[in-house]
Amino acid sequence: MVFTAVSFAGAPPVVWLLIGAVAALPFYYKHPSVTLAFGTVLAAVALAPGAALWSPYYRIDFRQLPSPSGWSQPSAYIVSVNHDYHQRMVDLSDRFEAENPDAQPNRSARGTYELPYRLVRNPQDVLVVGSGTGNDVASALVRRFDPGCDRDLWPKT
């Protein structure tokens, strides 16, 4: 039950380590050096900078890329999981491309998301399955498809 509650709360590592330290307390409380070591680790983890989101298995970082000059919104967001690249959300709007034609990662990403429309000219309908961060849907919207084209693999009920 504790695991479920702490998982549901999205607790950071310091909470998990504290639970472990308390659970192991009967085995080390008579050994000051071990107690000091546990305390030092807990303090180091608690004081570590960062605004990561946590699940029992993943560290999720969300980073905003700087806005191009004269543009009021970020050009993209990067999502990494356990310090590995996972996804990026990019501005695929025609206006952004017209005003910032060389902005990265948007410029390189646009070709990837336009590929289906180059392979099949003027499709009647578009179905995006597992849209992730929504770049596929954004690309469909730029092409004037109905916003209802997105279907999640695991819909929330």
Image (tube, rainbow, N blue to C red):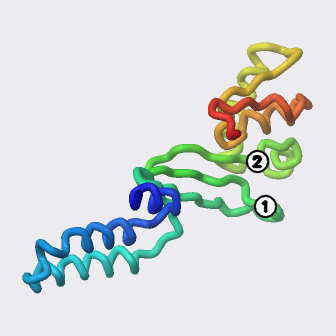
Residue type at mark 2 is Asp
Q: For the residue labelled by badge 1, is the local secondary structure a helix, a strand or a loop? A: loop
Residue 72 falls in image quadrant: bottom right
What label does residue 73 carry, if any?
1
Position of residue 119 relative to residue 75, above or below, is above
> Residue 18 location, x and y as percent?
32, 73
Three-letter residue code for mark 1:
Gln
Task: Look at the image and tell me in which quarter the N terminus lies.
Answer: bottom left
Labels 2 and 1 touching (C-beta < 8 A): yes
Say which of 5 and 51 sits in front: 5
Residue that mark 2 sits on: 91
Residue ranking furthest to the front: 1
Left/right of residue 46 with respect to residue 156 in the rendered view: left
In this rendering, the count of numbered labels is: 2
- Measured as percent of width and height from the top left, residue 99 is found at 85, 51
Q: Residues within 10 Å of mark 2 (few under 14, many from 20)?
A: many
**Residue at 64% from the left image edge and 61% from the top image edge:** 64
Residue 63 percent location from the top left of the image: 59, 60
Residue under the image location 19 percent in, 69 percent down: 24
N-term-proximal mark, 2 vs 1: 1
Which residue is drawn at the image coordinates 11% and 86% (left, top)? 32
Q: Is residue 77 visible?
A: yes
